[in-house]
Image (spheres, coloured by chain):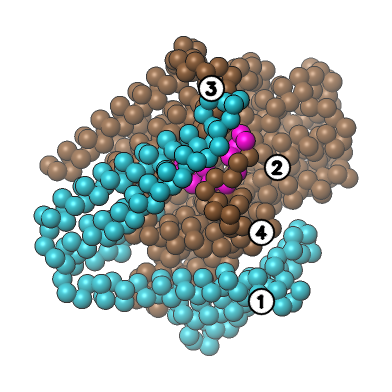
Amino acid sequence: MMDTLLAAIDQLFTLSTMATMLLGVVAGVIASAIPGFTITMAIVLTLPLTFTMDPLQGVATMLAVYVGGYTGGLISAALLGIPGTPSSVATTFDAFPMARNGQPGRALALGIWASFFGSLISAIILIIAAPPLAMIAVKLGAWEYFSLIIFAMTVVASLVGKSMLKGLMTGFLGLFIATVGADPMMGVPRFTFDADLLANGFPFLVVLIGIFAVSQLLSEVEDAEAIQHGKALIPDNISFRPMDALRETLSYPVNLIRSSLVGVFIGAVPGAGGSIANLLAYDQAKRASKHPETFGTGNPEGVIASESGNSATSGGGLIPMIALGIPGSAVDAVLMASLMVHGIGVGPRLILDHGDLVYGMFIAMFLAAFMVLVVCLFSMKLFLRVTEVPRSVIVPVVLTCCVVGAFALNNRVTDIYLLLGIGVFGYVLSKLDYPLAPLVLGVILGPIAETNLRRALMTDENWTLFFTRPISLALLALAVVSVVFAIRHHRRQKRAALV
Amino acid sequence: MSSMSSNRPPKGGRSSENSGRSGPLAHLVFNGMLAAIFTVLFLQAGDLPSSMWEPLGSGSFPRLVLAALVLINLAIILKEARAFASLTPAEKGLVGRWIWRHRLAFGVLALFATYIFAVPLLGFALASLVFLLASQWLLGARSIKAIGIGVVVALVFSFGVDTLFRDVFVISLPRGLLG
């Protein structure tokens, strides 16, 4: 093992590999900071560039983009209130209010450290527990998947805000939006009305950009007086104290570790990923907090939970890929493809046949986490300059980036029409005080829930299996507990508000 | 007032204004429309084909979701109807003032909608250039310096982005007139 490890280190610590990894980190951070550019897109664009590299250099460069991407989403989430990637939706809840309260540097620094520790913890777990954890994740059948999604859906209960009914409405609306287009099992078109516009359904990314970015940007230009006096989006304050943020991040060790573990586990479950992990980690942190009422107003715990949770999925996603050859997400599938391009078969024998490569990937994860930290700490002052840009510039520019992001996803003009429609609808919802986060969660989880429910009943029509299979039962019990706690908390908050 | 999610603090509101029944009325109209649409879609989902291979078929899951949506919207309508009955009518001229206060948001939205429909016709670069210049001007870039910055920003994010995507990422954004 020691020889393999040394061989991996020898291959990894070369000038060319380190240079391409550094470029990968910068590219990942920048790409994810632009609303509409997912980590998947960044990594897909990197893939052709790695064909000429040796396998470890290629996969290490892509891992650098991957890890950098999870941190990059933080920048637009904190400074613009727009999640750069689906995995930073929950980051907007507290990082953006914190930035608006005049502490953009603190929001970014907390997010950077939380991301760093999340990546680090996930890399450690990846090395120690890859095979056993992957075995658990792979044992999940359609029943357990469906129950897992039901559990994840209970997160809606803590995202509903003032009105439970409105939260449920947008959550179910998200589930419905996900059913438009081809049926996931039979391919039958549903609710498309023979229109080209709806033929492919609502791409998740277009919904995300439309709902968050367009409606948020329109809300930003409502105050005519502030705009016409050239006011910036958030108070101009580029104070950035990374060491204070490090101390603050470490003062919430339980939150940091719990959120990272949530991220690793969700990352290891094929089909889940950062987009679910950040919301689940945020939800758990809010429930465990002594002051849950301060979540959503700039609470550091919220920033730490979301960022450590989403970054930890990077290591988690590699667990089933390395141990069993099953990609945990689209990004892992592209990573797998990059190995296959080099003639490396990914599967249970990967560790045995290409030990140096696998250990190289483990070390590359650590290295990428450190590189992201250094790059972000040194470049954050530059990013904080965004706070000085007046709204009259930033709003049109970000709207243009949204159009590019929506179009580039599938090269379809119809997607930008959908972007406009969803943006206007999202703006109406936000004006009527509907929470938007449950809608996004519904769109993410809807197809997974439907596919697994139908698959489970197709395998065996006996629906009691959802309650008799131990893991499924445990997940459903957790879902019930989660809802009961959320309702109790909601009622207590309402009572407190009345007093 | 608007908030991105209810986890956000409200911002920029003029809470002293007596909005009276306007809030509940807006909900009654909006949720009434949604309830009607979801009812029609629920009925339509019943016509989706089933399969001999699986007990649920294409329509079952959407019907389940749509039924829940109809019920939730009816519950919201009931709640808002009660609020409507207990409140006094809104101050006169409230709607006009609300629209005036949101004039910039509506202006940007109108420009954005025009931009979206212009992209396939004019091409991404040209449509973006016009949109960026017009919206920056609308949002207050009126001085010589601000206009100068606006022109540079517009060129970078229209022709610059178009070139970057075409030559570096090999993704061709709509070309329109330039194609």
Chain coloured cyan in this rendering: B
Labels 3, 2: one chain: yes
- Closer mark to the observer between disc 1 and disc 2: 1
Labels 1, 3: one chain: no
**Label 1 lies in what chain?**
B
User: Which amino acid, by three-letter code, is at mark 4?
Assistant: Arg
Instruction: Locate the N terminus of chain A and report the quarter of the image it occupies.
Output: top right
Local secondary structure at mark 2? helix
Measure the alpha-carbon separation of dots 4 and 1: 16 Å
Local secondary structure at mark 3? helix
User: Which amino acid, by three-letter code, is at mark 3?
Assistant: Leu
Of residue B124 and residue A4, the one placed in the foreground of this image is B124
Local secondary structure at mark 1? helix
Measure the alpha-carbon separation of dots 1 and 3: 51 Å
Whether residues under marks 1 and 2 lie with C-beta atoms below 8 angstroms apart, the answer is: no
User: Which amino acid, by three-letter code, is at mark 1?
Assistant: Leu
Q: Is residue B73 visible?
A: yes
